[in-house]
Amino acid sequence: LHSEDVNLVEIGNKWKSKVLKGAPSIKKQDEAKNIYILSMFPYPSGSLHIGHLRVYSITDALNRFYQLNGYQVLYPMGWDAFGLPAENAAIDRQIGPAAWTEQNITKMKQQMDTMLANFDWDREVTTSHPDYYKFTQQIFLELYKNGLAYQKDAEINWDPVDQTVLANEQVDSQGKSWRSGAIVEKRKLKQWFLGITKFAHKLQKDLELLNEWPQKVKTMQKNWIGESYGTEVVFPIFQNDKDQITTFTTRVETLFSVQYIALATTHPLVEELASSDPDLKNFLELAKSLPEDSKQGFLLKNTNALHPITSQLNIPIFVAPYVLSGYGHGAVMGCPAHDERDFAFWKQNMPESEVNATIFPEKASSEAQLSLPYCEKSGMLHCPGTEFDGMDANIASKAVTKALEELGRGKAAVNYKLRDWLISRQRFWGAPIPIVHCDHCGTVPVPSEDLPVRLPAVDNLAARGNPLKNLDSFVNTTCPSCGSPAKRETDTMDTFMDSSWYFFRYTDPKNTEEPFGSEIASKYLPVDLYIGGVEHAILHLLYSRFISKFLAAIGNWDDKQGSGEPFKRLVTQGMVHGRTLVDPASGRFLKPDEVITTDTDGLIIKATGQQPSIVYEKMSKSKHNGADPDDCIAVHGADATRAHILFQAPIGDVLNWDEAKIVGVERWLRKVIKLARSLSSERSLETSTIETPAPSDKDLEFHNEVQKLLQSITSSFTHSLSLNTVISDYMKLANLIENAHRAKAVSHDLLTKSFRILVTSMYPVTPTVAEEAHEIICRNKELAWNLYSWPTAENVRESELVDYRVVINGKMRFTHNADKSFIEDQDYAIRTLLALPSSQKYFAEKTIKKVIVRNKVFSFVVT
Ligand code: ANZ
Ligand code: ZN
């Protein structure tokens, strides 16, 4: 090897094992502050993809940054190991899901080492291990004890491909399963639910406390929870006085324009009437295939409602699929005049009938002037004969609610879109629900000393579906309560249950008695920084907030704020897109080996000689645009790969992965090693220890530049997290030092000091290059320093010296470099200037007529 060569891969290998241990602590344990940095734990699919590389590069850099700042960093890693993908993969490969999962974990752990991620492996958790799911089951039982886990018959989402039930959150807007993509079917089944709705208000309200969360995520959660303040209005039925219909409205001031009631197809009254009305039965069958926005309705015969206040009208009642069964009371008071959907429904079903408006924009004008429906929330009521006539709409809303309350026909109410969380899964690879069904005692929780309810060892799953059902050894048990033969629950828990508390377990991973110790969890939580994909904006983050709040409510941990919010700051990283080559002629995706790179760095399709078009898209096999982190690290080393992925885009943005662009990063890293070699071989120029020469202007300017860059780097790590800027600051700093070094412009002392700042500040991102540069410099004992202590910022200093200009008879003649205070005593300054050797030729034998001193200029008029 040529002595000038720098091999980044070799440097990476040389320092790998040291760097994997992290930076040695610069503070004693009890003096250090804590910080908890968390990346969403991965599902052990078998290989680390480039998206993982991105998140862990971010979190690892932050982890190391805080280490150098004397923090005790909790930086754990684990495996979200249960779930359908593992089960399906195991079925396809004819091995047990446990074995499949373990082998994947081993491989991914190696890859995490390869990218130098400094996870605390002593704290590793794997959700499919009995020592973990024992406590998932225990938390379930806590919920059960508190009335927050219950079983009920429910119309549920059935995934016909994966043969299991799905939570609402797992069905997309087109009614398809988030995993299998199959159209989800509605079925009625007995299922286990968690009472997340009991926490709906807190979950909505406490979003306000999360001021370090992206607004986008908070908005998504807010919409999903869907808190809505309104009024319950009870409509008596005209034909009998035992039945009544309760509706929910957010616009109770429109009560006097009600023209019909619409019921959901599953409303109890509809089900009752359908048993004796074949036409209705037919309609309900037809309704199943109607599109969601259909305005078709079925008018109930011989059933009308009474107006709750005027008692006058005979209000027709329809069955209408546009009314959602799960929302409010599954019943709507229809106001065609003031609601778009109601208007459309009325026009379709009662085309001959008029529309009764009761709210008008200003002072009650005539209906003829109003274009209907009028849906503004402001205006004035026009309902002669009632006490509300002429009232402002907003005031009327309160007054009408009050009137209803007095009549016993309604009250103020809050509604939520959020439904209870369906956690039953009819699959094998999940934590068994720890319940026993006994003919005498009903559902009986498994006593906590009998936990975990273990999954039986299965090394070959025959088919999709739940083999637990057919395993007599699993199903048959005795009732913990009465001792008679009983059957175990065979549903397993949704994997989101496993991931809703794993960040607590990291704080106390070896605890065998409880999920985690309250004191230790309260010390570390809330998580200071949580980084993961925006795809979890609702599911995982909402469930985790719920479980954390529940655990706080029963005293399992204390966040000192009383909110039980688990994540202080949330960052959602952007996707990584791959370079996708397309044949413009055929639109076909090209494999990388179907093109060649020209001398000018252009691309040519081998077969056609044409240029391919280049786009960046989500990586997929069919587009041949994937990139493997291992490959990149093998060629460029882990440091360059980490720095490259951070450099290419701000962490929240989409990143277009282009390996070729890594050359800039490599150039910088090589430069740093070369600078280290060169600086360590030079002798310090500092000769005297008694008298340090005053810093020159150049030194000050250089010092200031270095400090500004250090401040920028520090603040990017602590505040903005703009790690792409950090990389460009490193590059600027390296260039600055290199240029000053080459020009011999600043003192060697200052140069080496600045170089140490550069090397230490690089350690978080490129730890092996930092170690190598540190080692090289330390060969010169005089220059040694502690690599693991973040440089303290120094003040940016103003120069003490000023260039004064001397102008004679209007011409600039020379400059004089002197102290700032030089100008304060003008007589002294002028005398000094006149005595300078450089001034002799201008003043000899001349008479000075006048001197003007302004700013830094001395103007002489001489004859
Ligand atoms: C009468 C009315 C008059 C309404 C008017 C609106 C405008 P949010 O804000 O989402 O809570 N609604 C109530 N239950 C429903 C159900 N199960 N399916 C479909 N729609 C339902 O919406 C509340 C409004 O949605 C309620 O206010 C009700 O229509 C409708 F000029 O009641 B409104
Ligand atoms: Zn029993």
Image (tube, helix red, strand yellow):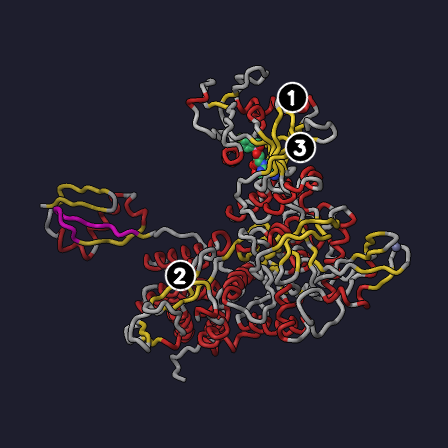
Q: Residue furthest bottom?
A: 1
Could you tell which of marks 3 and 2 lies nearer the N-terminus? 3
Could you tell which of marks 1 and 3 lies nearer the N-terminus? 3
In the picture provided, is 273 more to the left or to the right than 400?
Answer: right
Q: Residue furthest left?
A: 863
Whole-number angstrom distance, CA of label 1 to CA of label 3? 15 Å
Whole-number angstrom distance, CA of label 3 to CA of label 2? 63 Å
Which secondary structure, mark 2?
helix
- The x, y position of residue 266, in whole percent, is 66, 43
Q: Is mark 3 within 8 Å of ligand 1?
A: no
Which secondary structure, mark 3?
strand
| Residue occupied by mark 2 | 728
| Residue occupied by mark 3 | 246
* Range shown magenta: 802-813
Q: Image quadrant of ligand 2? A: bottom right
- The x, y position of residue 100, in whole percent, is 65, 73
Q: Of tags 3 and 2, which is closer to the observer?
A: 3
Residue type, mark 3 in image: Thr
